Amino acid sequence: MGWAARRLPAVLYGALAAMLLLGVRDVLFVYEENRCSMTYMYEYPEYLKIKLPKKTARRYPAYELYLYGEGNYAEENKNLILTGIPILFLPGNAGSYKQVRSLGSIALRKAEDLDFKYHFNFFSVNFNEELVALYGGTLQRQTKFVHECLKVILKLYRGQEFAPTSVAIVGHSMGGLVARALLTLRNFKPELINLLITQATPHVAPVMPLDRYLTDFYRAVNNHWILKAQDLRNLTTLSVAGGFRDYQVRSGLAFLPRLSQHDSALSVVSSAVPRAWASTDHLSIVWCKELILATIRAFFDLIDENTRQITEDPKKRMSVLNHHFVRHPGKLFEDNPEAFTELTGTFTWIKVKASKWTYLVYNDSDGKYFTFPLASHRESYSHVYCESTMLDTSSWIYGCMNSNSSVCLEATDLSWRAELLPNVKVVILKLQDYPSLSHIVILAPPSAGNKFTLDCEFFKEDSRTIQLPVTNLFSFGLSSSKVLLNSTGLFYNVQLQHFNQVYQAFKIHVESHCRSPIERKPSVYRLHIPWSHEDSVTVANVPSFTEISAKLHVAQPENESRVPVLNIYSSSDCQYEVVLKTSFLQILGQIIRFHAGALPVYVVSNILLTYGGQLSTLMSTGQCSEFSLELVTAAKPYKVEPIISIVVFLQGFNWFREIWDSLLLPEVDAAVLSSQDAWFPLVSLILFLFGTGIAYWSAVFFSTSLRIFSSLWLTLTRPAVLPKAKLITPRRLCLMGSLALLSWTTCGAFALLIVYFQYLLKVIKLSVNVRAEQNVLNRDLDRSKETSQNSVRCTVKKQNLTGSTSEATQSLSSSTTAEAANSLNIHVTVLHLFTWIVLLNLPSLVYWLKNLRYSVTLDPDPCRTTAIILICVLEVLMNSSTSEVKSSKLLKMAAQVPFPLSVAVLAFGRMHLYRVPHFVTSSLLLHVLCCIV
């Protein structure tokens, strides 16, 4: 292959690697700044270890239960005479029980403000910081331990006047899933928990499905919550996702399954939570002060004054959660607010007839009521919009039904219809929905040195609603959609037409221009997604140029007709220009965000195609090309992608579905992802190309490292000629048995790692010898040239004899070197496959090492059986050569099998990474048979 032919793939795969890195950069680094404040403890935190029953402590030696406390409160609780409300915190993957301190400390400060009329006791479980997001073998054990903890906690309150009968749970990350799994236990009583709040918990599916215990656990939990939804109606569940800052658990995974109970489950993104409006990363969600405050306020509002425990009324629980996490009216929560309110006080009543009104209050000692008669506006306008920059929790807008009187003594409080934004309270009323109201009343209380503004305007909905079609996915930001808002209104709805898929991503630029350079309140831009609580809020000074990222966590459901809306809460004398462009970099980021976990599958598929191509070339030409060269030829997406697309299409027909099920084949992962609205058009092709790029550059890196290491080895030592090893010897059988026993009694991934380093050493030695033989061959060629130049002094007969002997020697040496090079190339490919097997099983090894002091054996071990088979296969394979394979009767089959396996890997491995080693093992097993048969 010429220089230009080699150069072209490098350029192509370089471009692919650059695109991949840009997508990774968008996920890891391109997001909003951290708006969260840190929570601080006013006193030193203490964790009191709760003594567990001996049977429980013996069964779960690695787990512990703690009670959080500070200062005098901690001292008072050392005798474990508890009178508060129990809340249990469950840490997540590699999480610490000490993460409860933010919740516990702020709840303690809140209780002190109330003179301990109510207070909470925060418990926390120590799961030994286990990696349960990567190894699912202990999830069931954690769930059973939490069940025991609930019993122990409730026993601590036995005999108290207001003894609790249930425990509220806060679960971070996988801790939230463990809490949900409690309902699947046979002997679990659902009344033990009535409130569950999860923080950044991947409810839908595991982030990295690395073993079947993890996927089986998810399947059992989600199926139970779907099938037993009616039995769970007394349990109120809130799931809070972190937004785009959380690159470990994307927010789409944190939304509770759609088919679960709709009336008692709520899913929100932290960027949409009132009074927080901040995206959080995976760890900061447990200490983000704004979110913790919302949670603690909700806890105190959930208390029943009669029982002094969390209310048993599911409707009230949902009302409280909606108040603090979905729509906050700017008022303190009231369970049953009064329908009518008396407007008392010696305030001045002022009638306002204008359709647009502004009132600036500054150091006004007299209160005023402004009344807006509706009769004169109903025919001309459809809505009324009012806002107040006074952010206290008092009522400020009312509806009056006295049509003739100039004052209104009794009115309905419309402040509950308001919505709190970062710097203003707003209310939008549709006049048609309030036919009995005669007036709108706005209260301007005495300001006492405070400065605030009140605004109201009547408008037609059509005049404030603008449709803005989004740009095409393939415009790459070269084209744009633009709208200019010339009106003097206070509020606009910019509807983003055709924005409904997770693979779409846009940059929205909002530029404001004002007529006069006076000081104004900042504008608020809210991207509202109507089908999920994932809004994002941006506050911008006026005039200014603001950039907003528009992308989705959850795609638009099939039965949803509403579109995303950009709400602009504007200044009345300013002009706003909205420009929308496709963001190609953020599209790459969305692909990585949703499908980065499947990249190993695509890399292995590429390597399998290359592996099959090498075996085919070996069969046809007797030569085996280098990995990177064969990858360019063999790894083509059109070989595998159409097959999977056809299968997914055919599965839409009942007859094909019946045949598929009769063959006991699992569902194709692409079909499952499509049903979850997480499958983009052309995404599989893009991921395949990314996988090709990763395989290519990893091969380049490995071959370069091998070449450098071989040169250093040759410089420092003189390599010994490797004898032709027998495939199976008593010593090798003994080693196989020892490693298999090690795998069975300790950890399969540990035994695989030993074999991996053994194989790597073999490849390095083989590379050194190939390099040495090539050097010898080059020297022989140089000597042959010198001999041919001096041959004129010899007789013709002697010349012919010497020449023939030299050619025979060179031919034999060249043949030996070529055979060794062929063997090296095929071993490098096998080592690439083996590398990904080891990487996919590495989490179980890390878990085993971390828990070695508790048990020598990893139980359950997700790769024990696979490890034993691979040990036997690779111990034989690492001593084989291509000369044995070329003469095998099974070579043709071995060369054809990697292709269907590469298809199977993509079809069944994207959502089940633990299946990948099984397909690779099948291919390697056939290779070994080629060496024997």
Image: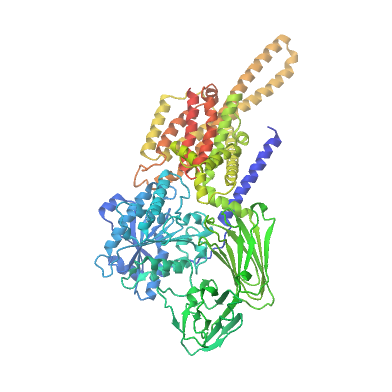
Q: Is residue 717 visible?
A: no
Residue 793, image quadrant: top right
Quarter of the image that includes the N terminus: top right
Colour convention of the picture:
rainbow
Residues 269 and 350: in front is 350
Residue in the picture at 37% in, 65% down: 314
Count the numbered circles shown. Answer: 0
How far across and down, in percent of the image, does residue 502 sit? 56, 54
Residue in the picture at 60% in, 81% down: 358
How far across and down, in percent of the image, does residue 605 sit? 54, 38
Residue extending farthest to the right is: 792
Residue extending farthest to the left is: 159
Q: Is residue 732 above or below residue 641?
A: above
Left or right, 517 with reference to 720: right
Q: Is residue 150 visible?
A: yes
Q: Is residue 852 above or below residue 478?
A: above
Left or right, 394 with reference to 30: left
Q: Is residue 882 above or below residue 398?
A: above
Residue in the picture at 58% in, 84% down: 352
Residue in the picture at 40% in, 64% down: 101
How far across and down, in percent of the image, does residue 166 sit? 32, 63
How far across and down, in percent of the image, does residue 478 sit? 69, 55
Residue 702, image quadrant: top right
Q: Is residue 462 above or below residue 653?
A: below
Residues 74 and 529: in front is 529
